[in-house]
Image (tube, helix red, strand yellow):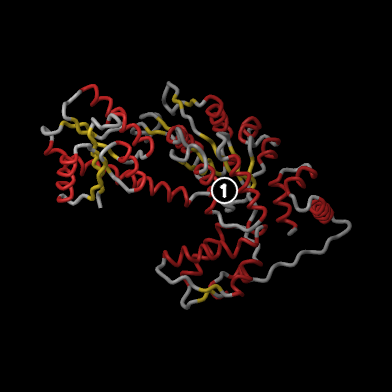
């Protein structure tokens, strides 16, 4: 239903307009002055306002500004008995959809209202879609009961409103892009672009073109100008996944962009500005990589202003039932199946598995299981062999084996820090990613 509020102190004219609009299929509300009009807007879902310029308590041009400040999606058409160009200009500046003269433009009112309401309803649909996208990628959408992931969420929520670079670390498949999206949605840049690029996917030449863009003729095949992702992210967020894979030459160029907010497209001679927030992710120990000259130390320190480490799935076993149920419902809907029951043995196998591919691997396994499902319950029959295989027994610790001694020492430090891995890594004088790798290697 298209809803209109008519504000006019002349009762007969207001009534006539309302009757005409109702016969055209509009739902109409009425108000005799600006104050009562604002009250109607506060209580009713109005798409457009048809308002007289001369009201007993306020000028209609000023009322436009008041309405737009509280209900920016409502469109307003002003009616005046005597056309006044300065008033018309000011009304449009204040946000009015149009400004027309009574009598002369009566035939325009209905089609004008249709256009105004179409615009208002389109804006409402866009706003609703943006809200849904925001909810889908918000921190609330991250399912977890695990203390380690809750700590990561807490850190990410604290840094999200602060316009600074963030480095997300953790194994492949731990949900780094999900966190990057959530940080973006919780920031002041949420209404702008979120642009993502995996640095391990492309060769150096293609990666450079993807990031910085190029001018026509910059290289063979460059048939037209193309914006790079740095430019596309202007005003928004650039997410660079697997940044540890970026070639050293491009690392130097990226550092310059971060320091100056300027870059040069391939084949161009002039600089282009871009104001973006960088969120980077890696499964490597960038500190160690920089010490061994495989990653620029100046870029590492520029990226590592704020680090958020995402734990592996095997360290958040409590979350496996939550994630499993979420993916089961997701893929059941995708395949037009009723969400099945999950057998106890099926869940036990999932919780006992070591998950080298983390959440991404769990998602793929659940999708496969739902596709294979014939009955109403997921059982171990739908699981791949490596998930159902019994776990490999760890070798006993030897008093003379160096690896065994390292394992024992790490375990003691973890016990000392009450499993606080960041503090344990500091005491051991190693990177957090290195510690996680050794925990995985030794099955701690």
- Residue 13 lies in what quarter of the image? top left
Q: Nearer the viewer, residue 228 or 325?
A: 325
In front here: 4 or 57? 57
Return the residue found at the far bottom. Answer: 375
Q: Residue at x 48, y 69 (%)?
A: 370
Label count reads 1
Question: Whole-percent x and y of residue 193?
Answer: 44, 39
Q: Nearer the viewer, residue 98 or 229?
A: 98
Q: Which residue is mark 1?
A: 176
The quarter of the picture where residue 221 lies is top left
Name the residue nearer the viewer: 123 or 399: 123
Point 25% across, 32% down: residue = 55
User: Is residue 342 placed above or below 307 in the rendered structure?
Assistant: below
Residue 6 placed where, x, y %?
Answer: 23, 41
* Residue shown at the point (73%, 49%) measured from the top left: 421
x and y percent of residue 154 in the render?
62, 47
């Amino acid at each position: 239903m298209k809803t209109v509020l008519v504000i006019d102190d002349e009762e007969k004219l207001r009534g006539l307009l309302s009757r005409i609009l109702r016969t055209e299929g509009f739902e109409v509300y009425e108000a005799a002055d600006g104050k009562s009009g604002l009250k109607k807007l506060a209580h009713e879902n109005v798409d457009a306002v048809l308002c007289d310029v001369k009201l007993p308590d306020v000028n209609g041009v000023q009322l436009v500004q008041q309405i737009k400040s509280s209900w920016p999606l409502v469109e307003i058409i002003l009616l005046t008995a005597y056309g006044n160009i300065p008033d018309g200009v000011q009304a449009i500046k204040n946000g009015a959809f149009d400004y027309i003269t009574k009598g002369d433009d009566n035939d325009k009112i209905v089609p004008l209202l249709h256009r105004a309401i179409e615009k208002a309803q389109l804006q409402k649909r866009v706003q609703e879609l943006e809200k849904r996208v925001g909810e889908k990628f918000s921190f609330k959408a991250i399912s977890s009961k695990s203390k380690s992931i809750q700590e990561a969420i807490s850190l990410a929520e604290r840094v999200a409103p602060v316009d600074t670079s963030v480095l997300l670390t953790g194994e492949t498949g731990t949900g780094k892009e999900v966190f990057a999206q959530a940080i973006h949605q919780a920031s002041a840049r949420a209404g702008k672009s979120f642009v993502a690029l995996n640095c391990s996917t492309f060769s150096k030449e293609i990666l450079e073109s993807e990031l910085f863009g190029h001018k026509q003729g910059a290289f063979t095949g460059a048939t037209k100008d193309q914006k790079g992702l740095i430019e596309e992210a202007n005003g928004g967020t650039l997410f660079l996944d697997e940044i540890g894979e970026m070639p050293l030459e491009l690392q130097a160029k990226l550092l310059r962009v971060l320091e100056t907010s300027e870059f040069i497209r391939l084949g161009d001679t002039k600089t282009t500005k871009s104001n973006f927030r960088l969120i980077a992710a890696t499964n490597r120990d960038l500190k160690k990589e920089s010490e061994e000259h495989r990653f620029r130390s100046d870029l590492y320190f520029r990226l590592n202003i704020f680090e958020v480490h995402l734990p592996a799935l095997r360290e958040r076993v409590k979350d496996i039932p939550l994630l499993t149920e979420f993916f089961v419902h997701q893929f059941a809907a995708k395949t037009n199946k009723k969400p099945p029951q999950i057998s106890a043995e099926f869940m036990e196998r999932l919780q006992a598995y070591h998950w080298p591919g983390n959440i991404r691997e769990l998602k793929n396994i659940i999708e496969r299981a739902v596709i294979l499902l014939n009955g109403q319950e997921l059982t171990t029959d739908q699981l791949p062999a490596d998930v159902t295989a019994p776990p490999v027994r760890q070798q006993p610790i030897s008093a003379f084996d160096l690896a065994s001694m390292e394992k024992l020492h790490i375990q003691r430090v973890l016990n000392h820090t009450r499993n606080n891995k960041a503090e344990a890594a500091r005491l051991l004088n190693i990177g957090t990613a290195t510690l996680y790798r050794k925990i995985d290697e030794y099955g701690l």
